[in-house]
Amino acid sequence: MIQKTNRMSLVEQVASQMEQLIESGHWTIEERIPPEMELMERFDVSRNTLREAIRALVHAGLLETKQGSGTAVRSASALGAALQKHVKKSDLIETLEVRLALERQAAQMAAERRTETDVTQLEACIRHCQDAAEKGDQEAFITSDITFHKTVVQASNNQLLIDLYEHMTDILYSFVQELMAIDSPFPYEEELHIELFEAIHKQDKNAAATYVERYMKALKENVTMMMEE
Amino acid sequence: MIQKTNRMSLVEQVASQMEQLIESGHWTIEERIPPEMELMERFDVSRNTLREAIRALVHAGLLETKQGSGTAVRSASALGAALQKHVKKSDLIETLEVRLALERQAAQMAAERRTETDVTQLEACIRHCQDAAEKGDQEAFITSDITFHKTVVQASNNQLLIDLYEHMTDILYSFVQELMAIDSPFPYEEELHIELFEAIHKQDKNAAATYVERYMKALKENVTMMMEE
DNA sequence: CCGCATTTGTTCGTATGTATC
DNA sequence: GGATACATACGAACAAATGCG
């Protein structure tokens, strides 16, 4: 069978391969990729062809070039970069509302499909949250909190939903970090986490949705308050 | 104050401008854009620079070049193209589940925020659906059906949600078209549309969510049946 | 601080393949 | 088949930024 990809332009072939290398994690984030000269030899193409491929990935948000310095990986996913660009033009509240939509759906599906492994993982996440809260370690707490939510979504077993949610959350996180500078009076709704966990554990679909809604409502109010200050 | 990054690369400047032209609808979809020579003069850059910019947009899915023919607009949005690529690797069911998440949230928000204009628009959409159903015009019906759902989401007044939903729906639509070839035994849940409309009209948030869930459940079952055949 | 090597940025020229008329 | 227009690909040259000794 003849490979149809002979019809794919050289630039596309090179760009695809590089994209693969990035998304597969072979070229990790913030890492500098080999210089043009070396890549020319590796891919056996001319400099212009290679440069066009690099330009495509730069425009897609995957790479970042600096004259005189080199080219580095900026994002591991084209979808994430596209979302980020789009979200930057949007309202923070709008983004939160979309995140709520995704997490509620995920929580319901998690309640339906969760495995024993999911349950033990969620328990571990909650423990991490509690530990960080007791120690008063803000940063560690926020990280564990995010991990908890991501783990809930992962239990939904819907890869598209997982990807969208994680990108959305990462973007939100970096935004919130910019917004609230150093000190962060982030209230911990510990009960809500535990209740959500138990709803998933008991496979109670409606309860899971309700707790996500409550959590998100509280979060939304916090953010609006933060923005008014 | 010194301008920090007036040093945006020429290629990026050109690519951004072209992206603007596409997203603003100045270059409409499927339309062929001016040949390289003309664009070189308009942007006052060399051929290679222009080509790199075009390549970037091609890789982003906004443009499509054909040797000997020219360059045409393929998609009006970078996010849409990125989503499409990602969705193609996903399951149809997964995509439906995400769409449910978005539409349920949108319906709730529409119930809360809908204006009188939204109500009259939704009424018009329902009438179009009914007309098409009476005439037995499958294609017109599906189009009106999609328009109805998009109108519901638009009433949510959340631009990010609207964009995501519309891209998702367009992708789903093109998929379903491929899947079901010519004849399409697409069942019309007329009551559900009307009930959803009335819930939004009466600003009943919970009812709106319920009807979207029911509608999506029916749709999911139809799709699974279609795929098993 | 200077000079140098490295690396990316920009431009031009040339040859070839391919679709359209 | 021929003419034209466009896209593809390569090579070469110089400019500009960066980092190092």
Image: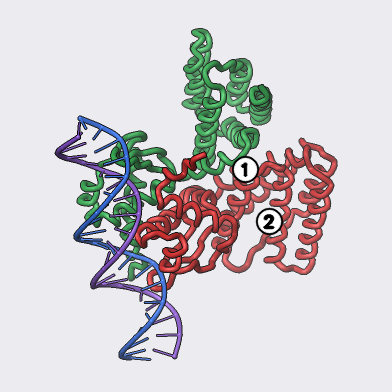
Chain colours: A red, B green, C blue, D purple
Q: Where's residue A16, x and y in %?
A: 49, 51
Left or right, B107 with reference to D12: right
Q: Which residue is mark 1?
A: A160
**Residue lying furthest top in this view?**
B135
Q: Amino acid at mark 1?
A: Leu
Q: Amino acid at mark 2?
A: Ile
Q: Residues within 10 Å of mark 2 (few under 14, many from 20)?
A: some
Of discs 1 and 2, which sits in the foreground? Answer: 1
Q: Where's residue B135, x and y in %?
A: 49, 8
The local secondary structure at tag 2 comes to helix
Mark 2 chain = A
- Residue drawn where x is 74% and y is 68% of the image: A136
Residues at circles 1 and 2 in contact by the CB criterion of under 8 Å: no
- Residue drawn where x is 57% and y is 63% of the image: A28
Q: Where's residue C18, x and y in %?
A: 32, 40
C-alpha gap between disc 1 and disc 2: 18 Å
The local secondary structure at tag 1 comes to helix
Q: Nearer the viewer, residue A46 or A71?
A: A46
Q: Which residue is mark 2?
A: A146
Numbered circles on residues, count: 2
Q: Nearer the viewer, residue B44 or A124?
A: B44
Q: Where's residue A146, x and y in %?
A: 68, 56
Viewer can see residue B41: yes
Mark 1 chain = A
Image quadrant occupied by the C terminus of chain A: bottom right
